[in-house]
């Protein structure tokens, strides 16, 4: 833990949890729960604290994602997940945008109700195997052909860890298209302030009474702190010791894992 | 032409020519010569002016590239081509670097004499169909695993035009890896000053007596001017009318095509 006390754990009414790297380590095999995390989720719920998952997951619909989490032993419902695709749909409707999707096949159903004819923007998610040379050229040509190109990116992560190794995340491909078109993407998902604000609204707790727990020093910790929340970094998932010397972001505390965070928070209730 | 005069054409002893978009339009079908360009190359040589091609082409060895140009009617030899791969080999040897190559299959023979065991850097070219999700993840993992990641990029173009449409160029993929690893690539090729300097050395003419002719406002025109050369932009290839309002780069003149440039230059000899 950073510092000697646990003052950071006082006056908490709700928790926002990142998922990959906090609840489980993802992988092509479905992933592996992080020891103690399923029990920690149960203890949070039993304590009366509010709980919302705040994820940049864009490789599956929320329904499919929740089925996977439940199969791994996590007591989670769809309403307890804030994810970028539904937030993007909200934004597309609000602005009358018709997306060309460069996303994972399993995410496509989230956009079922959105008009996708004659696209006037590109929505980029973690498309994984769909990040082909042909698909990237296609997204690029659509953008460069627009009078005012609109690129909406579901997150801007650099990379993530799967059980078989590190993978480039959506942010890398976002940068490729930004550079080629000389534009700036609009990011939906962490660390965007509006995204944390929707998660807090769904949590039903004001920022000063909520704690974000994540493994990503910039997107989880930095983003949440920008919204006036406290934020912890777990030493699981993509955490690296060098994160503790980050030049700009300092978590309110480090914890070894979610279970330890929950121990300390529940002691302060 | 910009302005009314042709004073920019005086006291010239050698020309550096960009290739794609100046001599021919490239494409999967081998490409199409730009009308008048083959004759223009012959007239340059007949005039006694020195000539060197200065290209960021990295989809073929120089030998193969020259065979293609000759088949299209251009009287060019291998020694008359300055290209990024040989320059990169020089740099790799000088610094004892062992590359992992993410390049086009047809470029691989250029690196035949370079030790590629146990790589301590990544060399990125316009890999085209080799820009797969798996290959990009592999290059990324190698870089992020190095104590001090070294990424050498053969050019940093945003995109180029082939006969079947626009394609993302190596610069877009360079930006993706730069972002994911939080590093800066070293660029070999235009617009790097050292690259223009090697082309001038091969031309055997000092910068103030040389003119660069290209279709890329930044990489050809801007890069050459940074070296103290004059530079023309042709209105062929990837030229777009909006280039004429570029905020930072202003060519010494615009010409409709290479043939027109050569007309004017030969009149001034």
Image (cartoon, coloured by chain):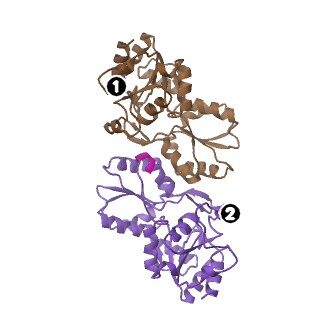
Chain colours: A brown, B purple
Between B77 and A202, the residue placed more toward the observer is A202
The quarter of the picture where the N terminus of chain A appears is top left
User: Tag 2, which chain?
Assistant: B
Residue B113 falls left or right of residue B206: left
Q: Which residues are magenta?
A: B177-181
Q: Given the image, what chain letter belongs to the residue carrying mark 1?
A: A
Rendering coords of residue A194 (x, y %) = 57, 30
In which quadrant is the C terminus of chain A drawn? top left
Image side of residue A23 versus residue A171, left or right: left
Residue B20, quarter of the rendered image: bottom right
Q: In this picture, is B234 found above or below A238? A: below
Q: Say if residue A28 shows up in the picture.
A: no
The count of marks equals 2
Does residue B115 appear anywhere in the picture? yes
Q: Which residue position is annotated with label 1?
A: A257
Decide which of B1, B155 is in the foreground and name it.
Answer: B1
């Amino acid at each position: 833990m950073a510092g000697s006390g646990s003052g950071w754990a006082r006056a908490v009414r709700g928790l926002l949890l990142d998922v990959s790297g906090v609840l489980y380590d993802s992988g092509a095999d479905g992933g592996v729960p992080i020891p103690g995390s399923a029990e920690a989720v149960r203890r949070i719920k039993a304590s009366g604290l509010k709980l919302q998952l705040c994820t940049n997951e864009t490789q599956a619909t929320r329904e499919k994602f929740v089925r996977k989490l439940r199969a791994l032993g996590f007591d989670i419902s769809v309403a307890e997940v804030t994810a970028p695709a539904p937030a993007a749909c909200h934004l597309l409707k609000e602005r009358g945008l018709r997306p060309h999707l460069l996303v994972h096949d399993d995410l496509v159903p989230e956009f079922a109700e959105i008009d996708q004819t004659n696209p006037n923007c590109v929505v980029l998610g973690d498309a994984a195997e769909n990040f082909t040379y042909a698909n990237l050229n296609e997204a690029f040509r659509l953008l460069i052909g627009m009078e005012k190109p609109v690129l909406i990116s579901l997150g801007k992560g650099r990379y993530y860890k799967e059980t078989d190794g590190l993978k480039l995340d959506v942010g890398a491909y976002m940068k490729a298209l930004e550079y080629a078109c000389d534009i700036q993407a609009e990011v939906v998902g962490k660390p965007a302030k509006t995204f944390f604000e929707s998660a807090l609204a769904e949590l039903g707790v004001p920022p000063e009474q909520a704690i974000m727990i994540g493994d990503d020093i910039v997107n989880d910790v930095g983003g949440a702190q920008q919204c006036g929340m406290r934020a912890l970094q777990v030493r699981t998932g993509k955490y690296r010791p060098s994160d503790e010397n980050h030049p700009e972001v300092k978590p309110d505390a480090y914890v070894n894992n979610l279970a330890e965070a929950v121990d300390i928070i529940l002691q302060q209730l």
